[in-house]
Image (cartoon, grey):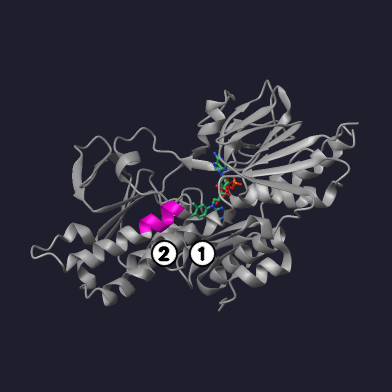
Amino acid sequence: MKKPKIVILGAGYGGLMTTVRLQKQVGVNEADIVLINKNDYHYETTWLHEASAGTLHHDRVRYDIRAVIDRSKVDFVQDTVVEIKKDEKKVILENGEVEYDYLVISLGGEPETFGIQGLKEYAFGITNVNSSRQLREHIEYQFATYNMEAEKNDNRLTIVVGGAGFTGIEFLGELTNRIPELCREYDIDPHKVKILCVEAAPTVLPGFDPELVKYAVSQLERKGVEFLIGTAIKECTPEGIFVAKGDAEPYEIKAETVVWAAGVRGNAIIEKSGFEAMRGRVKVTPELRVPGYEDVFVIGDSSLVINEEINRPYPPTAQISMQQGENVAANIARLVRNKQDLVPFEFDNKGTVCSLGEDDAIGVVFGKKLTGAKASFMKKVIDNRSLFMIGGIGLLLKKGKFNVF
Ligand SMILES: Cc1cc2nc3c(=O)[nH]c(=O)nc-3n(C[C@H](O)[C@H](O)[C@H](O)COP(=O)(O)OP(=O)(O)OC[C@H]3O[C@@H](n4cnc5c(N)ncnc54)[C@H](O)[C@@H]3O)c2cc1C
């Protein structure tokens, strides 16, 4: 009998978790497993704010995919997915195509710009190794250029971060640690540097515990961040941004660096392939399948799972992506053995920690509120745990964060 072919798209948190679990749960004689990713490396998306600020080298946030998969069981294809032909059960790649019996879409997300003019063209993102490397280089170039010019352009030393959610705040934490180093290196007066965080919502870190939010804001303000809360970015231009509070007239803030960190939508491949989606995310069945396409699973940032307690989608996180990967691997192993009793996905929220730089953070872990060094310690434990879950002790020793105190 022909072996079923399981194709996994994307080697991020969800895709790699699915792969390493499947390679343990399914024998070589039972199924063929193919993993497709555009790069030959996986990157820790949750560490990209560090690479973007320049507090961690980008090579530290990535590792070779082949080093964590069992190549006798998994065929790794480095290629870019162009489209999924769901009715023909095949995936179109830049350099070919591949058919599947079971498909796992784990292609991650993309920045949501909410149609704000100029953001796509002029703002930087924190989305992958390439964008992080470019942002770090750009900020450093502004500092390096400042003293080269006879007429000083202070806008070179103004950095605007759009969005005070998780990504924006974690980036600000790293940035405020990096700025003093850059000032020393390029002989810049630190008082000339301006860091602004613009957030349209009425609070920083919406949904987080208010006491912890207060702590985060005061720590970042102490390090020089100015928050413009309840203020929306209306337009981004090559010279900066236009913002407005409520219905007030928009005004301009000049800045050579604008970073957009305010929203995630599903991968564009989802809509391009004709899947029904909300902001590019597929509202999946309890077994994480696409309604009407039993052989297609969607996990991670391109999936939408409702938290029944509050009737709202779970925020897209690495934590939920990895748990979905474990669930999908176990269910596909069942299907391969002709068992139809799939286990519905249930998110087990272990807590959230938001970094405020190298040695500071806020978080709620197992229901307990943490700040400062304790929270920062937990953040590193979480970072190390995801390495361990994917690549075991070998990967943890190679890439782990052991500067825990
Ligand atoms: C700065 C930052 C900090 C964060 N901090 C946290 C945190 O502390 N905790 C937390 O839980 N979450 C955090 N998140 C969110 C978390 O990183 C994402 O939710 C998570 O990465 C989603 O996992 P995924 O498997 O869906 O996709 P990803 O991990 O993004 O992986 C997607 C993979 O698909 C590949 N790919 C994309 N398009 C194609 C294509 N067309 N063809 C082939 N391959 C493709 C990519 O190269 C990548 O390897 C953070 C995010 C950011 C940006």
Secondary structure mainly formed by the magenta segment:
helix
Three-letter amino acid code at the position of disc 2: Gly
Classify residue 2 by image quadrant.
top right
From the viewer's perspective, is residue 265 above or below residue 278?
A: below
From the viewer's perspective, is residue 54 above or below residue 86?
A: below
Mark 1 — residue?
Answer: 59
User: Picture coordinates of residue 144 (x, y %)?
Assistant: 24, 67
Q: Nearer the viewer, mark 2 or mark 1?
A: 1
**What secondary structure is marked by label 1?**
helix
User: Picture coordinates of residue 164 (x, y %)?
Assistant: 40, 51
Residue stretch in magenta? 130-135
- Looking at the image, the residue that sits furthest to the left is 151
Residue 347 appears anywhere in the view: no
Q: How many marks?
A: 2
Classify residue 215 by image quadrant.
bottom left
User: Picture coordinates of residue 334 (x, y %)?
Assistant: 86, 39
Q: Residue at x 80, y 39 (%)?
A: 332
Look at the numbered disc 1 and say if its residue's Cβ is closer than 8 Å to ligand 1: no
Quarter that holds the N terminus: top right
Q: Residue at x 68, y 41 (%)?
A: 8
- Looking at the image, the residue that sits furthest to the front is 95
Mark 2 — residue?
Answer: 173
- Crowdedness near tag 1: few (<14), some (14–19) or many (≥20) residues, C-alpha within 10 Å: few
Look at the numbered disc 2 and say if its residue's Cβ is closer than 8 Å to ligand 1: no
From the viewer's perspective, is residue 271 above or below residue 159?
A: above
Classify residue 379 by image quadrant.
bottom right
**What secondary structure is marked by label 2?**
helix
Q: Residue at x 30, y 66 (%)?
A: 224
User: Picture coordinates of residue 387 (x, y %)?
Assistant: 65, 62
Give whichever of discs 2 and 1 has the lower sequence position: 1
Q: Would residue 318 appear left or right of 187 to someone viewing this image?
A: right
